[in-house]
Amino acid sequence: MTADAHPAPYLLKVDGITVDFDGFKAIDNFSMTLDRGQLRVLIGPNGAGKSTLCDTIIGRVQSAAGRVSFNDEDITNLPEYEIVRRGICRKFQTPGVLPSLSVRDNLAVAAQKDRRWWRGFGRGVRKAEAVRVDEILEQVGLAARATTLAADLAHGEKQWLEIGMVVATEAELLLLDEPTAGMGPNETSKTAKLIHSLLGKHAVLVIDHDMSFVEELGAKVTVMHQGKFLKQGSVAQVRADPEVAAVYLGRAKE
Amino acid sequence: METLLKMEAVTAAYGQSQVLWDIDLDIHKGGAVALIGRNGVGKTTLLRTIMGVQKAASGVIRFNGADVTAQKPHERARGGIGFVPQGRHVFAHLSVEENLTTGLSALAGRGRGLIGQGVPDHIFDLFPKLAQIRHRKAGVLSGGEQQQLAIGRALAGQPKLLLLDEPTEGIQPNVVQQIEEALRRVRTELGVTIVIVEQYLDFAWSFADEYCVLMRGRMIRRGTTAQDSAADVAHLVNV
Amino acid sequence: MTTSTRYVLAAGMAFGLGQAALAQDETVNVGVLQSLSGTMAISEVTVKNAEIMAIDEINAAGGVMGHQIKAVIEDGASDPAIFAQKATKLIQNDDVVTVFGGWTSASRKAMLPVFERADNLLWYPVQFEGNECSANIMYSGAQPNQQILPAYTWAKDQGKESYFLVGSDYVFPRTANMIVKKHIDEDGLSLAGEEYVPLGGTDFSAVIAKIRAAQPDIIFNTLNGDSNVSFFKQLASAGISIEDTPVMSFSIGEQEAQAMGVSLVEGSYAAWNYFETLPGEANEAFIAQYRDAYGANAAVTDPMLHGYLNVYAWKAAVEAAGAFDVDEVRAAAVDLDVDTPMGTVSFAPNQSLRQTAYVGELNESGKFDILWQSEGMIEPQPYDPLTFPNKSCDLSAG
Amino acid sequence: MTDHPIFKHGWIVVLAVGICAPALLSSYDLNLLGRFLAMAILAIGIVLIWGEAGILTLGQGVFFGMGGYCIAMYLKLSSLEAGALPDFMEWSGVSALPWWWVPFANPVLALLAIIVVPAVFSGVFAWLVFRRRIVGVYFALITQAVALTFATLLTSQQNTTGGYNGLTGFQTIFGLELGTTDGNRTLYWVTLAILALVFAATRWLIGSRYGTVLRATRDGENRVRFLGYNTTPYKVVAFALSAVFAAIGGALFTLHAGVVSPAFVGVVPSIEMIVWVAVGGRHSLWGAISGVLIVNFAKDMISSALPEAWLYVLGLVFILVVMFLPNGLAGLVDDLWQKYRTRDGSNDMAGSTGALEESK
Amino acid sequence: MLDATLLAGQVFNGFSVASLFVLAALGLALSFGLMRVINMAHGEMLMLGGYLAYLTYLVVPGPLAILVAMPVAFLGAALLGAVLELTVIRKLAARPLDTLLATWGVSLILQQAARSIFGPIGVGVTAPDWLNTGFLLAGVYIPSTRLFILAVAVVVLAVLGLVIARTRLGLLVRAVNQDRMMAAASGINVRRVDLAVFCLGTGIAGLAGVVLSLLGPVTPSVGQSYIVPAFLVVVMGGLGSMVGTTVAAIILGLVSAISQIFLDVSMSQVLMLLSVIVFLQFRPQGVVATRSRALEE
């Protein structure tokens, strides 16, 4: 299927990406696609290249070969803020909140539609954005903490705040890198619900290790191993796959 | 049995987010303990806390009878803890031999005289490959070679306790065999006590005599590999 | 502490200062304003010492018209804005009748409006580039026609035909050299080169390369301060000897020569209006007294002497006028003979000092052997007629 | 930001005392205070760029000087008869007014230049450096080199800048006689008013969305980039604004001091400007103003009485403040206030100021 | 006016100036690479070296005094460096910008202390006669002092290179430079390595002070005249790299010397700054980059 013939069939198309760190191939000719509004979970053992893949999509890491297109537009190696403005936003593994800003301001910065500097010379937040921030505060359960400085949040709260920030950008594609790290079972389950509520409007790519969480998400799973594509399918299919079990529990057979 | 490492109610945190909760751990001399659990449950942090590169927020760590909680990493290394971290952390711009030589620093205080004598032969004996490539820069080595180097470097300091964080991660299977074999010799021939973080349960079971399962920063299960089977804990680790 | 209390505090302190500084019955305040800190402190502290010494002498001898003089000493901190600030303070808060001080042209220029506005009088002790005359300043330092031009004339008479000008990059060297260049041109001699190095500059490699290439008969050196050491050292190490290529310096006095190490500059020339080696009892007495107070090795230099004579000139003018009033003092000062260690001098109507020019050669003991002196006193000319034909200084009109 | 009641409502008192100061102070001390308030305008710019944006600049003297020269060039020309040249140009053999002096004959253009010249210069410079993502220590060192170079350049171009002497000998500005008691008083009020204006504007800016993004950039520039912001123009604008504030301060200072010269521009004065703000508190506008007043009044008193001691005091105070009071006196006041309030049992929801340090 | 001799002479002078830049900047670059801190009092280490040379000359006069002065200055400056590292820099290690500011305070105090002890006037150190000569090489006069300084810089670079490449200390320095955490976990006392490198760096600055005294006076502010170009060399050189520092010093030395054929010294300073800014447009990471200096720092 070529992009030329049809209106963009995929939201995201990763095509043969290779990332080389001084001779070590963190990602090796990896391809995948993602539809609009779809949820996808990316799993794989440590060092499989999952985070690096996100880095490459978002423009933090330069790819040596291959091509990333988004909405049928080539975004390979654009500056990161340009990629974000086209509608991709990412939550990092360690929470990337802005410590000396309040929770509300963190979200407001993310929610601001017009990110050009001269549009910032106003005091209040635009009404639509303020409404959006309030919605998200409710959604991520931080309404009561709105005036707290982000630095003073608990770990799980920071995770939610960052998910909230990513959502607030209204990006079409959200990349969530380990959104439940450091959360308890209840929080994890809430996070799964939160992610479900985002679907349709956003496509979401989740990286996580917590299989109960992945199960709860109930989405298609892509398995990576040593920078390569390994398997793709439902949670049950992946679970049943001997090759996947092997990379997790034992040796991949020669 | 004599206790080599004892952790009492150790907690650790990155900034304000706690990652380890109330860890109690006893490791007897000569033992081998496998830490297992899914990614992100705190195994790596636990090793880092033992090494001292991550500060314990509370609790006490005793090593070889002494309270080392307040000690800096290099003091713990000199006390006899060797560390093979996740991602190997070889000094990429140093040659293999130089990497191994840095490991000798841990001998300061215990055997300063040995520092000048260069890399001990038994390391090349364990990892013959390293002898062949001793003048190459570590940065250009394959993952397996780097891993052998990282282990060799830790052993150069003649540790009493060796901490290994996923030593077989991302390494070709044939090299994995060599590394496993070498680690067994480290245990048996050198008498080094080992704490290993390991994803692969079959290796964990064949290598360690005890296992600990971590989940969300807490130790949820402990036992001996002789009594419990790997299948009993697979659901705690598996996809 | 809140900002508001601080305002009140500051106000209170300032008020207190003003009160305390009011003159008492018999005492008359004069200001002494030199840089006691910063880059210029090296030079200016010695001038301050000489000025204070003169004031102390005068007080010991009964003061001025029966009044004891109190010197209010302020630090100009080598910063023109602070000079202006402190001059204002001296005049407004300390009610000084006159001020002795300044060294750099920058400090004088910054103080000038303050003195003009308050109609007070500044006694300025250092040789400078001219191009200025204010009714509120008495210029006792040499004008260009009293130092640099006589030196040029002397060199010309010695048969020097090509001149290399080296200076620090600021007003005095640039203006002085501009005047010299005009005269070189007028006399049909040749300019071998002209180079400037930033104040405090230490790298002369390029300058010296150009000197080597140009092979001048003489170097006119208007470098300031420490740059001189670097210049002479690098000159020597570049194999350019002072015997072959003489150097005439305009800012190296006895103090500088001693500090630089005499061997480095021995045999080089300097032009001044005063040398420690000038004959005369008054000079010997002055030197003896200064060394008594500031150490046996203390150097005595031209600006110091001008600082010292300024105080005596002021005293003489006050006594001649019979008043401390500025207008009367400056009127009385003109054409009034004052006996000083450098002989009897007087101020011309343009308020600059008539004085003799000397060329000296530095000997191995760090003193200058006087080679030449001008025929009598030279009338000061703030504007060199050749260079600035349309300019003149006429204070009677203002 | 300092948030306790003294600062919340105390500004009315402070402003009132400020307005009445001419009645309380001698003409000389008023002039001194006026100079310091002009410096405080610069200090507010440093709070913006250093405190808020986290960018240390060691070159504010450059812009302080630019403002000073802009106004001084106008004053110089306006004190001359039409067609005449400033004296130093005549001695330097300049026969016609250089082109870049010409606009400064016009008072409106000269006032405009105080803002435009530093804004353009700082903007271009900052853009060149920030776009290559050069930050932190590197940026600080480059700005220091700019300060040195600009001072050297001003000194060396004597024929058009007045060189080491700078520009002086000003008479009147807009009919206001400079240096007189009346002139001083008016000038003082103008300075106070502009300071209040700049203060209010900066307050507003810090509270605006722009200010929020700027602080966000300090906290985590990467995070902000990955939220879709191009952070470079934000930083460039902050730097340019701080430069403009410095220039306004410099212009007013020049009017108070009656002189502008390269002595304001170089490396040492530029770092001293940072000292004021470090002592007062880099994150607090009130702190910065207090810092300027405290350090400079202390300098005025100590350096006259004990010129030798001043540099020891300055050096030591700076070391101690940086090591033990990174948020300056304002931070200390804040901490004490927090402690007092917690002991008082009232709420502690306002959050800690410690977070600011943690973000480093 | 551009003749070949003058150009050749200026190229030599460029290397001579570069050798001073190298000596002044090496210490800065070394500790910057290792600890990410800039010591603003580094110039005062030069000053100390100069004064120690002066004092050495007083105690042991004679033609070889300079050879005695060099180790004395090295050790003296290294000792002062140790005190500075232990009292101020170590405590501020995590805040590089604040370290920069605090060390500026130290610089002020040291300058004033020099003024109090030695007086505000510079002291002169007379070069021994064997250095006060020179020779002609292809029409270019080569002064021995400049050749000597060049030689000192080359020797310092060579020795430092050997120390870093061959000695155990050098090995530890390289290890710490690459991976602090792992170095510590291998038993290396990283703080002591920091200290050693800092002292080595200040010691080299002390040496620089001795050779500077051959060219100019030793004054309380002598360090200030070299420190800003040294900072530019560090910025241009890239993170703490010896090679980068040397290359940057040579580039800036040549820019300075050759431009002075056409420009005066002040304008050549302007040109030096501009060339650094232009250079950074093309290589923001510096001459030699081991790590990116953008964002992540």
Image: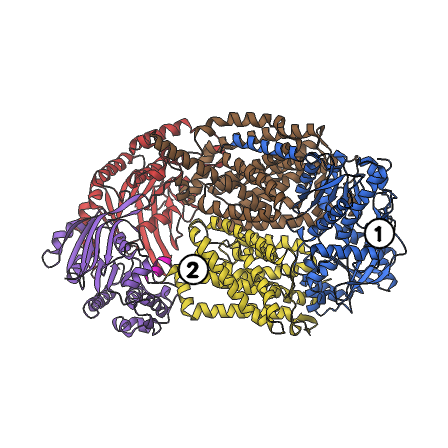
Chain colours: A red, B purple, C blue, D brown, E yellow
- Magenta part of the chain: E179-187
Nearer to me, D140 or A112: D140
Residue type marked 1:
Asn
- Residue C146 placement (x, y as % from top left): 84, 52
Nearer to me, D177 or C289: C289
For label 1, the crowd category at 10 Å Cα-Cα, with few meaning under 14, some 14 to 19 and many 20 or more, is many
Q: How far apart are labels 1 and 2 at the CA level? A: 61 Å
Quarter holding the C terminus of chain D is top left
- Residue occupied by mark 2: E194
In the image, are marks 1 and 2 on the same chain? no
Q: Relative to C301, is D94 above or below?
A: above
- Residue D50 placement (x, y as % from top left): 50, 42
Tell me which chain the residue with mark 1 is part of.
Answer: C
- Residue occupied by mark 1: C145
Query: In terms of image quadrants, where is residue A166?
Result: top left
Q: Relative to A101, is B214 above or below?
A: below
Nearer to me, C60 or D319: C60
- Residue B153 placement (x, y as % from top left): 31, 66
Quarter holding the N terminus of chain D is top left
Residue E154's mark? none
Residue type marked 2:
Asp
- Residue D47 placement (x, y as % from top left): 51, 38
Tell me, yes or no, if residue C191 can be seen here: yes
Majority SS type along the magenta span: helix
Residue E145 forms part of the magenta stretch = no
Indicate left or right for D181 with E177 as reference.
Answer: right
Indicate left or right for E289 with C194 as reference.
Answer: left
